[in-house]
Amino acid sequence: MTSTQSTAATVVADYFSAFGRGDLAAARQLLANDLSFKGPLDTFNNADDLINSLSALAPVVKGVEQHRTLVDGDDVATFYDMLTPMGTAPIAEWHHVRDGKIDAIHVYFDPRPFAH
């Protein structure tokens, strides 16, 4: 693994760790201010809006079980299950890391269980 891949993988791993333990302040420190976020339920153009959204989600997240992480330079794809009272949601996230911070996140999952 090159140092760029190692750095990108570490930044994303640290982000997941912070989110998984409910430390949104630590997660925010790993996001670029001009973050681009796209998912099936929301789109944001800055990190603070994402963190505000995650703060509403955090109380229902009971855990995150990571299955696989793939790294290609500054791009990191993570496949995991999010455990919630509504059930387990399989999720794929594609992160791009720039200058040691995540500047883009694309999230892929079936939003139907969360639409109730």
Image (spheres, helix red, strand yellow):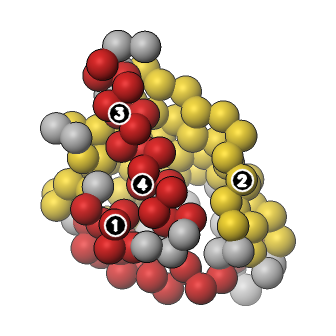
- Residue 78 location, x and y as percent? 57, 40
Q: Is residue 20 among the parts visible in the rendering?
A: yes
Residue 65's disc is 2
- Residue 33 location, x and y as percent? 16, 61
Query: Marks 2 and 3, Cα distance to the nearest angstrom?
Result: 20 Å
* Marked residue nearer the N-terminal end (4 or 2): 4
* Amino acid found under the numbered disc labelled 4: Tyr
Q: Mark 1 points at which residue?
A: 26
* Amino acid found under the numbered disc labelled 3: Ala
* Amino acid found under the numbered disc labelled 1: Ala
Residue drawn at x 22%, y 41% as measured from the top left: 100
* Marked residue nearer the N-terminal end (2 or 1): 1
User: How crowded is the residue under tag 3: few (<14 C-alpha within 10 Å), some, or many (20+)?
Assistant: many
Query: Marks 4 and 2, Cα distance to the nearest angstrom?
Result: 14 Å
Residue drawn at x 51%, y 75% as measured from the top left: 22
Which quadrant of the rendered structure holds the C terminus? bottom right
* Marked residue nearer the N-terminal end (4 or 3): 3
